Every structure is written in structure tokens, then in C-alpha cells.
Image: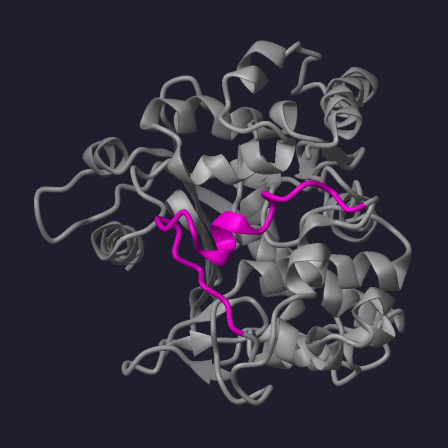
């Protein structure tokens, strides 16, 4: 049965969070979204969150900028002093066909793009109703951010080794298969535990993981993942799993004693001078942040995550990320296609040396260290993913690079 008291509490938590934190975040207002929440399919907040895979185009475009107002979320306070980004020109990407930036954004329901090179904005464009202060949900881009937080916790000693078993930090996994999986295997999605990530299948793991009622205050994902079993030897097989990145989030929170939102604000958002407050969705059962998705931020601040990665890759004396993490995070640890592209620690790496954080429905932070280049995009693709949509995004990146040459 549905825990009605917990459901009502979660609904109240969403509204109270907005009321108490909007004072510290000028880009948000305290708005009663109860009518919008009621119109989302599902009885519990977990069921409503799962339903987003099947929202209409109009619902996606309306709700993606206000996810923090629809679901329990934790504030990521911004810096007092923002890191400056000088806007130097209005770059015109060059496609090989008749595609223009306007047609690319319109045809693919892209809401914003930004290009930063040498810490200067070369291009920044938004769709109607979206601007540099709009917060937009990230989906799997958040996975890469969660991985960065592991790199920080490793540097600071809260996580002692990437080869530690998960049960050392998430004691609830003691006695379960996932308890024997190492932190490194979790970061590379090589746990060996079976998982189905089909976004268009209502019965897939990714569509089912938040559906069941809460079991006390244990997070949905812990309850769901504990039942899963090995299908391959750990460390031998790569299999994309959002559930595992939610476990990464729990790992960081258990190891540091802080929410992902608090840790992100303390270690990245404030020190790196992020321009806007952000929000990170929280599990309705545990109120712990969801590590695999749910970070809502402005386009400029998503791009700043890219500039931070560029800075960290230079291995300065004041790096915040562990050197071991930096060296491996964006390497091809596991090949994902015949072209030599692959996966590191929750970052996608191309055989050209560029790497990216990407999310369903078109989200992206693309980084090319050889060009000191960051390209970020927010979108509401008509499908979670497809070869055609992914190809279009890649052609946009190539059009930007061609215009810069």
C-alpha cells in the first residue's frame, strides 16, 4: 500500500523547501505547483518521477525548467562572487548542409547552447522563454558530477580507496551482491549485476526503480538494488546503469556525511564562482539526493563544470580532485564501440581525446582539452535518445569546431 503520510510529507517538503530557500536564490520564486503535481501520472512522488520518461513534448518543455518545484529537492547555494565569463563574439556554427543554429535548435527542441573557449563565451543562444538564469534539469549529466564528488572525497580521504567494497560505506549492502562490488567497478558500470536501461520499456529496471512504496526511510534505489544478482564477474562487462549511479550518490553521502547538494555547493559551486543557485532532486523515502540525475542548474553553470574539468586536468598543486581520479576519469577504461570511443568514471570519452557528460533528452557538457573548449546544451528532445538525435548533436559540435578553425 502507498504510504500516504509519507507522500503528503514529500509534497509539503517540496513547497516548504521553495519557501525557505527562494530568499537565497533570486532566480526562483516560491510558487504553489500543487495543480501541476496533481496532473503528473502516479500516486507517489517516485511514480511521478518515473513517468517523465513518457511525458508529452509539451509537458517536457514546461516541466524540465521547474523540476525543483515539482519534486523534493535540496538547494545548492551559489557563490557570493561569480567567476567572470567575458562574451567576445557571436560565433556562427558551420554545418556541411543547409542547417543553421536556428533550425538545429528548433528541429531538435534545444532550449539553449553555449560555447566557451579560453574562458570566453564565443556563442550563447536560448529559445523563447529561456535565458541565462533559467534552471534546467540535467538527467545523466548529473552522473558525471556525482563522479567528480567521488574524486573530491577520494582526495580528502573520506573515501579511502576506489578498490574498497561498497559495503564498507553503504552498510545496508552487507550480505548482498552489490556489497561486494568495488567503488571503481561502480564508477565504470562494470559491477557484473544485471540491469535493463531501456527508456521506452515500462518494465525495464530504469522505469521501475522508484515505483514501489517506501520501506521505512531507506532510499528507493537501495531497496530496489539489493535484490539484484551478479550475471557476470565484476570488472569484466560494461553495462550502462542509472541505478548504479544513484548508488554512487549514496556512497558520497554516506562517506562524507553530507547531501550531494551540500557537498557540491561547498566543494564546487561556491569555490568555482557559479552564477546561479542550483537544485538537486531528493529521494522521497530517504531525502538523500539522487546521484544519477536530477541536478537543475543554469546553462552557464553547466558550462562552468566543463571549465573546472579543464582546469583540473592540468594537475595543479591546488587541485580539488584526487590525481588518480583525474587521470582515469575521462580515459577510455572500457570501449563502447568499434571506433574506439569509451567510458571512464561516468564520463564518455571519444577516440579524439574529447570527453563529455551527456543526458537523455539532449543534455550535454562537451570538453576538448586540446582546444580549451567547452560546449554545453540543454534540450527537450522528442525522445529520450535515438541514433538520429545523437547524430544531430554530434554534427552541432562539429559545426562549432569548424567555425572556430
The percent position of residue 192, horizontal first and vertical second, equals: 56, 81
- Which quadrant of the view contains residue 189? bottom right
Question: Quick check: 378 left or right of 147?
Answer: left
Say which quadrant the N terminus sits in.
Answer: top right
Is residue 113 something that shows in the picture?
no
Furthest residue to the left? 97
What residue appears at the point 80 percent right and 19 percent down from the top-left corner? 16
Q: Nearer the viewer, residue 22 or 34?
A: 34
Return the x and y of residue 239 as percentages of the image width and height.
Answer: 47, 73
Say whether residue 205 is magenta.
yes
Q: Residue at x 62, y 38 (%)?
A: 46
Placement of 356 over or under 26, stated as above or below: below
Quadrant that contains the C terminus: bottom left
In the displayed structure, 78 sits above or below 180; it is above
User: Magenta span covers which residues?
Assistant: 194-215
Query: Is residue 308 magenta-colored?
Result: no
For this orientation, the residue located farthest to the front is: 1
Image point 73% across, 72% down: which residue? Answer: 316
Residue 325 in the image, given as x and y percentages of width and height = 68, 76
* Rendered view: 180 above or below 212: below
Disc tally is 0
Occupied quadrant, residue 160: bottom right
Image position of 401 (left or right of 242): left
Tell me residue 341's x, y (percent): 37, 77
Amino acid at each position: 500500500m502507498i504510504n500516504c503520510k509519507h507522500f503528503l510529507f514529500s509534497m509539503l517538503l517540496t513547497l516548504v523547501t521553495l519557501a525557505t530557500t527562494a530568499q537565497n536564490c533570486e532566480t526562483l520564486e516560491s510558487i504553489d505547483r500543487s495543480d501541476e503535481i496533481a496532473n503528473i501520472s502516479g500516486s507517489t512522488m517516485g511514480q511521478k518521477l518515473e513517468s517523465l520518461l513518457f511525458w508529452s513534448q509539451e509537458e517536457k518543455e514546461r516541466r524540465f525548467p521547474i523540476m525543483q518545484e515539482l519534486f523534493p529537492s535540496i538547494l545548492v547555494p551559489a557563490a557570493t562572487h561569480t567567476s567572470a565569463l567575458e562574451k567576445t563574439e557571436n560565433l556562427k556554427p558551420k554545418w556541411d548542409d543547409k542547417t543553421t543554429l536556428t533550425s538545429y535548435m528548433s528541429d531538435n527542441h534545444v532550449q539553449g547552447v553555449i560555447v566557451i573557449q579560453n574562458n570566453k563565451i564565443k556563442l550563447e543562444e536560448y529559445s523563447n522563454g529561456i535565458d541565462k538564469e533559467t534552471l534546467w534539469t540535467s538527467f545523466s549529466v548529473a552522473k558525471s558530477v556525482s563522479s567528480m564528488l567521488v574524486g573530491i572525497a577520494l582526495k580528502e580521504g573520506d573515501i579511502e580507496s576506489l578498490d574498497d567494497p561498497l559495503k564498507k560505506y553503504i552498510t545496508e549492502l552487507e550480505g548482498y551482491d552489490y556489497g561486494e562490488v568495488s567503488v571503481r567497478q561502480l564508477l565504470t558500470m562494470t559491477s557484473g549485476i544485471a540491469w535493463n536501461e531501456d527508456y521506452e520499456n515500462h518494465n525495464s529496471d530504469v522505469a521501475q526503480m522508484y515505483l514501489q512504496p517506501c520501506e521505512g526511510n531507506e532510499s528507493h534505489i537501495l531497496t530496489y538494488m539489493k535484490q539484484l544478482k551478479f550475471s557476470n564477474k565484476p570488472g569484466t562487462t560494461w553495462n550502462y546503469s542509472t541505478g548504479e549511479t544513484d548508488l554512487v550518490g549514496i556512497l558520497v553521502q554516506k562517506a562524507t556525511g553530507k547531501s550531494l547538494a551540500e557537498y557540491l555547493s561547498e566543494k564546487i559551486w561556491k569555490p568555482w564562482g557559479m552564477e546561479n543557485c542550483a537544485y538537486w532532486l531528493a529521494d522521497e523515502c530517504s531525502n538523500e539526493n539522487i546521484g544519477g540525475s536530477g541536478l537543475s542548474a543554469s546553462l552557464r553553470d553547466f558550462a562552468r563544470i566543463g571549465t573546472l574539468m579543464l582546469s583540473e586536468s592540468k594537475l595543479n598543486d591546488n587541485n580539488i580532485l584526487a590525481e588518480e581520479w583525474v587521470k582515469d576519469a575521462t580515459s577510455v577504461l572500457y570501449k563502447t564501440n568499434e571506433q574506439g570511443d569509451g567510458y571512464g568514471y561516468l564520463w564518455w570519452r571519444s577516440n579524439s581525446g574529447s570527453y563529455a557528460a551527456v543526458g537523455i533528452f539532449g543534455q550535454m557538457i562537451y570538453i576538448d582539452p586540446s582546444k580549451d573548449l567547452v560546449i554545453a546544451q540543454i534540450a527537450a528532445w522528442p525522445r529520450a535518445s535515438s541514433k538520429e538525435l545523437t547524430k544531430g548533436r554530434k554534427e552541432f559540435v562539429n559545426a562549432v569546431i569548424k567555425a572556430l578553425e
